[in-house]
């Protein structure tokens, strides 16, 4: 997803000063530290399991807990350099002419026969000693060492179930959502959340759930760090530039929605309160350059009320933003949904605390969304939370006036206004600078949310093709028509079949997909040949996706080889070029149906519109999509206004055109088959159930 932005620009430098240090020893120390971190995590989880065992002796012995399968998950396998080289060269063949391909082939051969042996040896040791040979380095070098802005470049967003609008009372919706999220936190802490099983049999790694709540990415001068607090009895509410601490427990229990609504109503009634000097634009610091934020944090926020208030924000379970604008959806006015997405992606640049694991946003009309930081977990985890929340909202939680149901048992604790001391040139200057940078960044975002309701996965299944492969081929055709060329394409796939797995890259632009796209633009190619080429392209895509999920991907292996080369201070022209290649088309499918409660046949209005992320390359597109039903697909398309060659609206039109052409292709094909049934292909097999 948004991780592609950091992966493209990945680079770091390591220098050895002073004594003559054995570089090999430095890498061994790096590998050792990875293993130590892994064993510390195992020990912590073991203690947690012991505690859970004493609490639940024989109570739910046959029901697996959230972390029940962690110990049985396999390690992420380390591919051979030879296999990775073969996959890599095949993936770039449609992107390079003969001369450049021969050059890249030569660089790959030199690398494989040269320094790769030494680099691979260290990775083999790391893969044996640590839990996962990729994840800790991926978090450190792709995320935490990134110095660019989190807003737009890294953080992503998710949208409400737009066909349901349970209440228009802002305080009621906010209270209900807060309560549901805190209930979810409790199921995670007690390990009562059901682990996700693929096809009900194969468990996925659950370690990312540990840091959903009470988590912040704290800025550092050279590298940030993830801070996770073991517990938090409060959330922070941001309203009209003012910050409030809201206690969520009283007398040992969670506050109920009706009690939380009293607290939120109290905040909304403070509309006449004015932000303190610097307070209104304060969150701009979290939106911008990480080094500048770290430096001002070390001075202005090092002591006194600023330190206390900052700690309150960062240690909160999460941040709740009560927006003054409505979040709207109207099929007749698509620009309203576009604006909805923009509000969630970046807001006004200072009404989201971008460092927090996530900020829940509630519009003035009661619609909701979230903005999530990417370091602590991947989009699938937030998607799971969102599904649980939406299904919880489908229950009767509001009365006929739109307020939360229930009668408060007591007067809940009054929200406490946070205080800041920012009225000096250093603080105000840094905040203003961050605000200006944030405005420039968010004003450059061109976001279009396409609601494709001509057809969905229902038609794709009649074509005997994977919906994901079908859509990826549509994106390839749309991009070629839009840009006049093929481009390196990023699709995120998960590696959570393995312990502490995160993601791997699928490369949808393949030799087969390029052949099909060219056939679609060549009027001399027959319908039967186009269908055959599309089947071949989808088969290749499925194989690539399966390889990525099973630890046979390309990019994470090359990334780790590059990390080792940097520590050894060995220059590799091959790795340097591979890691600098731009992903001009970055894509991600938003998963849904991760909880057994999600049943769209029973609750069709619970369809989520998914979410999206900012543009990855300055001259490219970011595309997130969710197959929301048999006849509905949402595409979230982003690009930069400052680029003269891209347009999110134009690309949306090309996606619609490509999908229409694919539908027409199969209609033509079926018509021909009725006339001449002897010319069958794979598509004529009986439909799989």
Image (cartoon, rainbow, N blue to C red):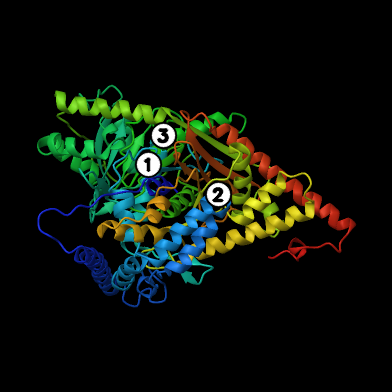
Q: Residues within 10 Å of mark 1 (few under 14, many from 20)?
A: many
- Verify CB contact (< 8 Å) between mark 2 and mark 1: no
Question: How far is the residue under mark 1 from the one under mark 3?
Answer: 13 Å
Q: Name the image quarter holding residue 441.
A: top left
Give SS at disc 3: helix
Helix, strand or loop status at disc 1: strand
Is 242 placed left or right of 107 in the picture?
left
Element at label 2? helix
User: Foreground mark, 2 or 1?
Assistant: 2
Q: Which residue is mark 3?
A: 170
**Residue 216, image x, y percentages:** 27, 47
First in sequence, mark 1 or 3: give its number: 3
Q: Which mark is residue 95?
A: 2
Q: Residues within 10 Å of mark 3 (few under 14, many from 20)?
A: many
Q: CA distance from mark 2 to mark 1?
A: 41 Å
Q: Residue furthest right?
A: 675
> Would you say 494 lies left or right of 422 here?
right
Q: Residue at x 51, y 28 (%)?
A: 644
Answer with left or right where residue 474 lies relative to residue 421: right
């Amino acid at each position: 997803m948004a991780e592609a932005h950091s992966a493209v620009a990945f680079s770091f430098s390591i220098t050895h000063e002073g004594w003559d240090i054995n570089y090999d020893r430095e890498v061994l120390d790096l590998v050792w530290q990875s293993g130590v971190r892994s064993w510390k995590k195992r020990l912590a989880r073991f203690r947690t399991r012991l505690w859970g065992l004493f609490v639940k002796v024989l109570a739910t012995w046959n029901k697996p807990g959230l972390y029940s399968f962690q110990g049985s998950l396999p390690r992420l396998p380390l591919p051979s350099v030879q296999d990775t080289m073969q996959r890599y060269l095949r993936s770039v063949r449609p992107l390079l002419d003969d001369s450049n391909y021969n050059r890249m082939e030569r660089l790959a051969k030199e690398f494989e026969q040269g320094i790769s042996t030494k680099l691979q040896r260290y990775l083999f040791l790391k893969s044996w000693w640590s839990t996962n040979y990729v994840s800790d380095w991926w978090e450190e070098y792709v995320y935490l060492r990134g110095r660019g802005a989190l807003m737009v470049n890294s953080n992503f967003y998710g949208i409400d179930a737009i066909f349901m609008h349970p209440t228009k009372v802002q305080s009621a919706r906010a209270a209900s959502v807060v309560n549901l999220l805190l209930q979810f936190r409790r199921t995670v802490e007690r390990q009562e959340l059901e682990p996700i099983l693929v096809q009900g049999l194969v468990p996925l790694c659950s370690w990312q759930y540990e840091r959903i709540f009470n988590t912040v990415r704290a800025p550092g001068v050279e590298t940030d760090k993830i801070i996770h607090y073991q517990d938090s009895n409060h959330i922070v509410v941001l309203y009209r530039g003012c910050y409030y601490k809201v206690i969520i427990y009283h007398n040992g229990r969670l506050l109920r929605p009706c009690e939380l609504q009293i607290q939120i109503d109290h905040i909304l009634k403070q509309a006449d309160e004015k932000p303190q000097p610097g307070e209104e634009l304060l969150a701009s610091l979290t939106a911008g350059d990480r080094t500048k934020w770290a430096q001002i944090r070390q001075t202005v926020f090092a002591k006194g009320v600023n330190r206390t208030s900052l700690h309150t924000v960062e240690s909160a379970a999460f941040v709740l933003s009560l927006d003054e604008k409505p979040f709207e959806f109207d099929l007749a006015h698509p620009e309203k949904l576009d604006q909805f997405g923009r509000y969630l992606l970046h807001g006004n640049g200072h009404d989201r605390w971008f460092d927090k694991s996530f900020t829940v946003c509630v519009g003035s009309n009661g619609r909701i969304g979230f903005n999530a930081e990417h370091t602590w977990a991947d989009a699938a985890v937030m998607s799971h939370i969102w599904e649980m929340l939406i299904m919880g909202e489908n229950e009767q939680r509001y009365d006929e006036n739109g307020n939360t149901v229930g009668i408060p048992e007591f007067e809940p604790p009054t929200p406490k206004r946070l205080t800041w001391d920012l009225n000096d040139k250093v603080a105000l200057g840094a905040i203003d600078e961050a605000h200006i940078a944030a405005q420039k960044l968010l004003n450059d975002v061109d976001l279009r949310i396409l609601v494709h309701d001509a057809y969905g996965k229902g038609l794709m299944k009649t074509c005997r093709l994977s919906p994901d492969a079908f859509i990826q081929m549509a994106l390839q055709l749309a991009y070629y028509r839009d840009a006049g060329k093929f481009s390196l394409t990023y699709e995120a796939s998960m590696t959570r079949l393995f312990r502490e797995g995160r993601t791997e890259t699928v490369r949808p632009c393949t030799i087969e997909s390029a052949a099909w796209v060219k056939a679609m633009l060549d009027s001399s190619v027959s319908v039967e040949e186009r269908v055959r080429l599309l089947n071949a392209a989808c088969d290749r895509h499925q194989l690539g996706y399966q390889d990525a999920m099973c630890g046979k991907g390309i990019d994470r292996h090359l990334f780790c080889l590059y990390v080792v080369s940097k520590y050894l201070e060995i220059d590799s022209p091959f790795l340097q070029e591979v890691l600098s290649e731009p992903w001009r088309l970055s894509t991600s499918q938003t998963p849904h149906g991760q909880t057994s409660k999600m049943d769209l046949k029973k609750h069709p209005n619970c369809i989520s519109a998914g979410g999206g992320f900012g543009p990855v390359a300055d001259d490219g597109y970011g595309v997130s999509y969710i197959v929301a039903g048999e006849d509905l697909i949402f595409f979230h398309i982003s690009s930069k206004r400052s680029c003269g060659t891209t347009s999110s609206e134009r690309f949306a039109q090309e996606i619609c055109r490509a999908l229409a052409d694919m539908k027409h292709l199969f209609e033509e094909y079926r018509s021909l088959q009725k006339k001449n049934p002897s010319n069958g292909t794979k598509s004529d097999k009986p439909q799989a159930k």
